[in-house]
Image (spheres, grey):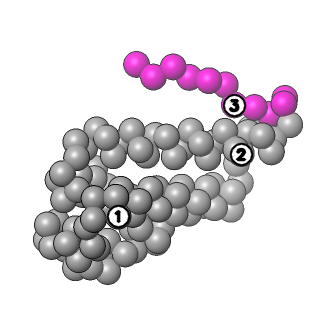
Amino acid sequence: MKRSRLERDQRYLDLDARYGRRLAEIRDSQGLSQQQVADEMSYERPFVSKIEHGHRHLNACEISDYARALDVDPLFLCRVLLDVVVEYDSSALGRQQEGDAPKDVALK
């Protein structure tokens, strides 16, 4: 099923917000402040705040920097992102009619 532009844009916003919350949970679990993460990344604190509140998404280089600041493997943050997408799409799938369900695709 093809999404409208509005549905696609809302999906991006929702995914950014969910991923940001997960990043904030990871940061909090390590006892780090937004300022400490920002300092480690050589960014200003509002950069981290915007990510954690879903107002900005991370590119691949920033995911690597964020992982280094949290002292985790970048692959871990990619897996967190993948989990967020799968959880989101699964919940959206529950709202769709059965005939509109997307096909599963195996990752290689």
Q: Residues within 10 Å of mark 1 (few under 14, many from 20)?
A: few
CB within 8 Å, label 2 to label 3:
no
Q: Residues within 10 Å of mark 3 (few under 14, many from 20)?
A: few
> Could you say which is closer to the camera, residue 28 or residue 66?
28
Which residue lies under the disc numbered 1?
28
Residue depicted at 84% across the width and 30% down the height: 98
Q: Quadrant of residue 43?
A: bottom left
Mark 1 to mark 2 CA distance (whole Å) = 28 Å
Give residue 20's position: percent from left, percent from top: 44, 62
> Tag 3, which secondary structure?
loop
Bounds of the magenta segment: 98-108
Q: Mark 3 belongs to which amino acid? A: Pro
> Could you say which is closer to the camera, residue 84 or residue 13?
84
Which residue lies under the disc numbered 2?
92
In the rendered image, residue 67 lying in the magenta stretch gets the answer no
Which SS does the magenta portion mostly show?
loop
In the rendered image, residue 103 lying in the magenta stretch gets the answer yes
Which residue lies under the disc numbered 3?
102
Residue depicted at 77% across the width and 40% down the height: 94
